[in-house]
Amino acid sequence: MNSLKLILISFIIVQHSYSQSDSLKVEAINKLVYEINQNPKDVISAYTKHIDSIEIQVATFKNRINVISEFSKEDRLITNMFLRDGEVIFISFVEPSAFNKNNPDKNINEYYYYNNRLIKQNSFIELSSFSTCVPMPPNKNTYDYYGFNKNFTNSFYLRYIDKLKDSVITE
């Protein structure tokens, strides 16, 4: 019985130390992303290309790549990729609301990488002050109500990250 307690306590300590380690890495990545954003430089290159049927507009900066992906007239993703020594450390996907182009409602998904390994991901919806005052009908879900694409799931983003890495970073 004592060995079982010892194993359980050891497991909890190991799990806690890993989570602290990753949270420190995420904090360091956030600081680096902030620094990169504070030092905007001129565009190194800008071009348009296609990945399958998706038209992408790419703007490359030092340590940052911005991509606008047009899937259709309604479906658009803004991707910000941050690099350190040529390796991706942070990617954010911002999906603007399809219903109102002037409405700043956004579906945001963030991915943190350390040594080419995904260590954290966040998903949240950023609503304008107007949207937070309007009640949502009970028969609607968030995606339907704000016009976000239901196909932009976590598994989609992870596959799309690989496609972007292959076609944008290697260029």
Image (cartoon, helix red, strand yellow):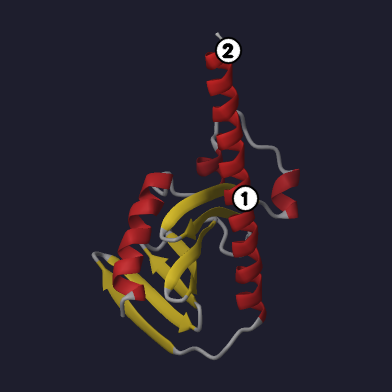
Question: Residue at position x 61%, y 28% from top?
Answer: 138
Can residue 127 be seen at all in this image of the molecule?
Answer: yes
The disc labelled 1 sits on which kind of residue?
Answer: Ser
Circle 1: element type: helix
The answer to which image quadrant residue 140 occupies is: top right
What is the tally of numbered marks visible in this picture?
A: 2
Instruction: Mark 1: give few (<14), some (14-19) or many (20+) Cα within 10 Å.
Output: some
Q: Single out the mark in the foreground, 1 or 2.
A: 2
State the image coordinates of residue 79 (x, y, percent, origin top left).
47, 66
Position of 19 compared to 151: left or right?
Answer: right
Q: Looking at the image, is 21 positioned above or below residue 56?
A: above
State the image coordinates of residue 161 (x, y, percent, origin top left).
38, 60
Is tag 1's residue or tag 2's residue first in the polypeptide sequence? Answer: 2
The disc labelled 2 sits on which kind of residue?
Answer: Asn
Q: Looking at the image, is 78 positioned above or below residue 46?
A: above
Q: CA distance from mark 1 to mark 2?
A: 32 Å
Numbered mark located on residue 39 in the image: none
- Which residue is labeled 2 in the image? 2
Q: Quadrant of the N terminus?
A: top right
- Which residue is labeled 1 in the image? 23
132 or 100: which is nearer to us? 132
Q: Quadrant of the C terminus?
A: bottom left
Q: Residue furthest front?
A: 2
Q: Residue furthest left?
A: 52
136 or 78: which is nearer to us? 78
Circle 2: element type: helix
Question: Residue at position x 40%, y 53% from top?
Answer: 157
Q: Are marks 1 and 2 in contact (CB under 8 Å)?
A: no
Position of 169 compared to 9: left or right?
Answer: left
